[in-house]
Image (cartoon, helix red, strand yellow):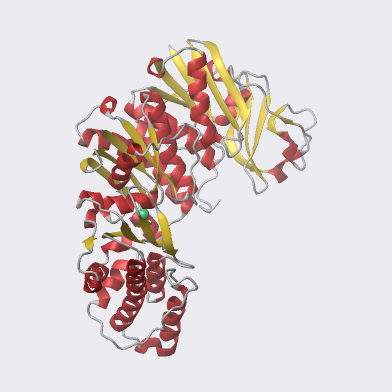
Amino acid sequence: MKICAIETSCDETAVAIVEDGHTVLSNIVSSQINTHAAFGGVIPEVASRIHIENISIVLEEAIKAANLKIEEIDAFAITQGPGLIGSLHVGLIAAKTLSWYYDKPLIPIHHITGHIYANQFVDKLEYPLLALVVSGGHTELVLLKEEYHFEILGSTQDDAIGEAYDKVARVMGLPYPGGPHIDRLAKDGKKNYRLPKVKTQNPLDFSFSGLKSAVLQLIQKNKEEIIKEDLAFAFQEAALNEIIEKTKLAISLNKVKHFVLAGGVAANSRLRERVNELKIDNPDLKITIPPMWCCTDNAAMIGAVAYVAYQHGVRGDLDISANPGLDYA
Amino acid sequence: MITLAIDTSFHYLTLVLYRDKDVINSIQKEAFKQQSETILVEIKALFDKANISPKDLNRIVLTDGPGSYTGLRIGMTVAKVLGALANIEVYTLSSLHVLAGLEKNVHILLDARAKRAYYAHYHEGIPLINERVVLLSDFDDLDTSNLKIFGDGQLISKEKYYPDYTKNFMDLEKYWQKINNIHALVPRYLKDNEAYHS
Ligand SMILES: [Zn+2]
């Protein structure tokens, strides 16, 4: 089954053709990162404008690169949410138009389930599965007791981890997006500054705003004397401690066979290293880290999960809405 | 020759299906903030009711602005996708022009928010004053009592009046702009280069 998937939830206009949920026939991503870097973040109206500029050419390229005729596509998958409303609209209308014109099913997808199922490109998923979703918009522990069944065990009470990285990078005078810069600086840093541990009511929830304020205070106290590498190190270790400790707790509280990492922050080199700690208490745990190409937003991951969703009977009518606050299936 | 006309530039969702010069079916309805949900449902209904297959569609004519940014992008996404992938010819027409149609000596005024309006003046389809953004205060010292105004006349203490403009797309066929590079088609936002935040 060949699925044409469209993803426009934030700042990438992306289209991919995926066969049977695991074979990528094409994967085109047109990133707006340079435009938004100039503004220091994603401006929703700018993102929508760029999506309408890109949508037709990215679609055309994806079909061409897959060496297919569009008539050979069996279904159209689309990110319905969460995301920026104006950006979601462009992809959603495109998918609906194609579904109507070519008389093929429409499969609406939750963006995060795409990140989770991106791991299908490298491993067979086994259940119960625990996903640690870490990105600029999300920090969540999601349990899949069985295939395509999502249960949120914990989520961030304030900033997403990627957002915290970006904000800390900004106060440190690093360019947007800040995550990779902090990751790079931290490699040369050492244990020097102390940052507080955060507390949340639900032990599986996350919080990063206290950490961000503590970094700000450190900078104000130390002024020019601050050692950026050490600060990056301290922040990164504190932020990653927060998510690794909670992941360990989630694994101890639930029967988990397979752990997967998902989302943009899964590209962080230190995080990729630290998930191996999970093996210490759980030697039989299967661990999968998504390939780098598929950590950032793309449509191949939407095509991957759409195949599974399709088997579970997920279909969308022509009247479905873009939903910025969409809940899991 | 089957033509689909699309206007999503303001509060209305207007769709017209033509066979040659004749209206087969049309819909013009208030759909503020609902255009995204309704547009494909209504397009499908137009084709189904007329017993026309989507594959029979030859041309799309759509309003490319000015208007609501979100609204413009909705109609344009349909046109760009079909233009690029299904080889449908795409043409554009101004959202103000289509309201005027072939009406004699008519002023078009549409809300551009923040005490501004999109404005143009037409006579039998011929532009006398081309579309532009004006301040509502520009009308303060004008005697508007004898002006025929279509659109948001209420902005300058006249009547709000939207005509039935389903026939107008075809009446103005000679003003259509043919889009030769579909990928380059973007909405004409008109009141541009100001804050991106609206
Ligand atoms: Zn994402």
Left-right relation of B85 to B127: left
Residue at left offset 24%, top offset 38%? A20
Coordinates of residue A278 in the picture (x, y in percent): 25, 70
User: Vertically, is B107 above or below A251?
Assistant: above
**Ligand 1 falls in which quarter?**
bottom left
Left-right relation of B71 to A23: right
Is residue A11 shown to the viewer in this render? no
Residue at left offset 43%, top offset 40%? A90
Q: Choose top left, top right, bottom left or bottom right for residue A251.
A: bottom left
Left-right relation of A163 to B101: left
Q: A35 or A125, which is in the foreground?
A: A125
Quadrant location of the N terminus of chain A in the rendered image: top left
User: Vertically, is A270 above or below A97?
Assistant: below
Q: Choose top left, top right, bottom left or bottom right for residue A144.
A: bottom left
Is residue B7 shown to the viewer in this render? yes
Left-right relation of A268 to A209: left
Q: Choose top left, top right, bottom left or bottom right for residue B116.
A: top right
Instruction: Please count the marks in the image.
Output: 0
Q: B93 or A163, which is in the foreground?
A: A163
Coordinates of residue A46 in the picture (x, y in percent): 45, 50
Coordinates of residue A150 in the picture (x, y in percent): 39, 52
User: Vertically, is A162 above or below B122?
Assistant: below
Coordinates of residue B21 in the picture (x, y in percent): 51, 10
User: Vertically, is B171 above or below A123?
Assistant: above
Residue at left offset 41%, top offset 15%? B53
